[in-house]
Structures are given as C-alpha cells and as structure tokens.
Amino acid sequence: MPGKVNPVIPESAAQAAAQVMGLDTAITVAGQSGNFQLNVMLPLVAFNLLTSITLMSNTAKLLAERAIATFKVREDNLQVPLARNPILVTALNSVIGYNAAAAIAKKAYQGGRPIIDVAEEETDLDRATLERLLDPTVLTQGGLPE
C-alpha cells in the first residue's frame, strides 16, 4: 500500500505484552502449586518474573525512543475538535448551572460550533471570562478555575 508506514515498534510492544501475560499465567499456576510452605515451582516463578521484567523494561525503552519520541503533535488538527468538544461545558456548571450548560452543549453539538461561541451567545459571560473558564490546559490540571 503506497505511503503506508509499518508500526513495527508498537506491534512488537504488543507481542511482548502478550508474552508477559503468558508468563504471568505460568507464575499464577506455579504459585498455586505450593504445599506445606514448600513450592517446588519457585524457580519457574523467579525465571518468569525476571524474564517479564527484562522484556517489559526493554520494550518500554524501545517504544519510548523509537516510537513515542518521534511523535509530532499537529496543533492545527487538535484545536478545532477540542473547541467543539461538549465536555468543556462541564467547567461552566458551577457558574451557570447544569441545565444551562447542558443546553449549550446540545446547541453547539447540533450546530457543529465551538462551545465558547455558543456560551458567549447564551450567557452573560464575556469572551475573556469564557476563555479563562474553558481553557483546556487549565482544565487538565484539576481543581476549579478561579
């Protein structure tokens, strides 16, 4: 397929995760095999646990360096859908009430419009206040906007 980029690193990470799940199952079964404070399968537990740790730590490093580090965020692709995301009105609940916020979300969604534009039309809040209340970066930091 022209232009296709093979995601071999994420695919190998998925394979490593599947392997670790299998090793975990073996560890679980081995852990159930103990009798009278003696478990003859402790070597299997140790081997599979150390193998899992090594495999996942190597996979995480490879995934971080060869895949995630090369990601490029396309801000232009983020801003339009983010501005239209109905979840933003949740920040307005404490200011205008749940029902008014829900009405804004529905109207914005139906019209395919940014939340802030509809909120500006439907409330007494000025644009600057709405920009402060609906700032997605601030909302991801937790707490209530001031």
Image (cartoon, helix red, strand yellow):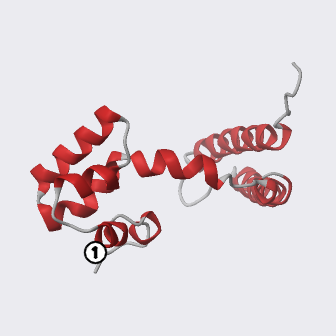
Return the x and y of residue 84 as percentages of the image width and height.
Answer: 40, 46
At a point 33% along the width and 56% down the height, the residue shown is 116
Return the x and y of residue 91 as percentages of the image width and height.
Answer: 27, 63
Instruction: Give the SS element for disc 1.
Output: loop
Q: Residue furthest right?
A: 2
Q: Can you identify the residue that label 1 sits on?
A: 144
Return the x and y of residue 24 as percentages of the image width and height.
Answer: 64, 46
Quadrant location of the C terminus?
Answer: bottom left
Give the mark count: 1
- Looking at the image, can residue 1 be seen? yes
Q: Is residue 60 left or right of residue 8?
A: left
Return the x and y of residue 41 as percentages of the image width and height.
Answer: 69, 50
Q: Residue furthest top?
A: 1
Q: Residue 9 versus residue 109: which sits nearer the camera?
A: 109
Measured along the vertical axis of the image, is residue 4 above or below residue 93?
above
Q: Residue 92 versus residue 60: which sits nearer the camera?
A: 92
At a point 18% along the width and 61% down the height, the residue shown is 93
Measured along the vertical axis of the image, is residue 12 above or below residue 48?
above
Instruction: Quadrant for residue 21, please give it.
Output: top right
Q: Is residue 85 left or right of residue 22?
A: left
Quadrant location of the N terminus?
Answer: top right
At a point 33% along the width and 46% down the height, the residue shown is 86
Q: Residue 57 versus residue 101: which sits nearer the camera?
A: 101
Q: Is residue 68 left or right of residue 124?
A: right
Instruction: Quadrant for residue 18, please give it.
Output: top right
Residue type pointed to by label 1: Leu
At a point 13% along the width and 54% down the height, the residue shown is 98
- Looking at the image, can residue 34 be seen? no
Q: Is residue 135 left or right of residue 98?
A: right
Measured along the vertical axis of the image, is residue 11 above or below residue 97?
above
Q: Residues within 10 Å of mark 1 (few under 14, many from 20)?
A: few
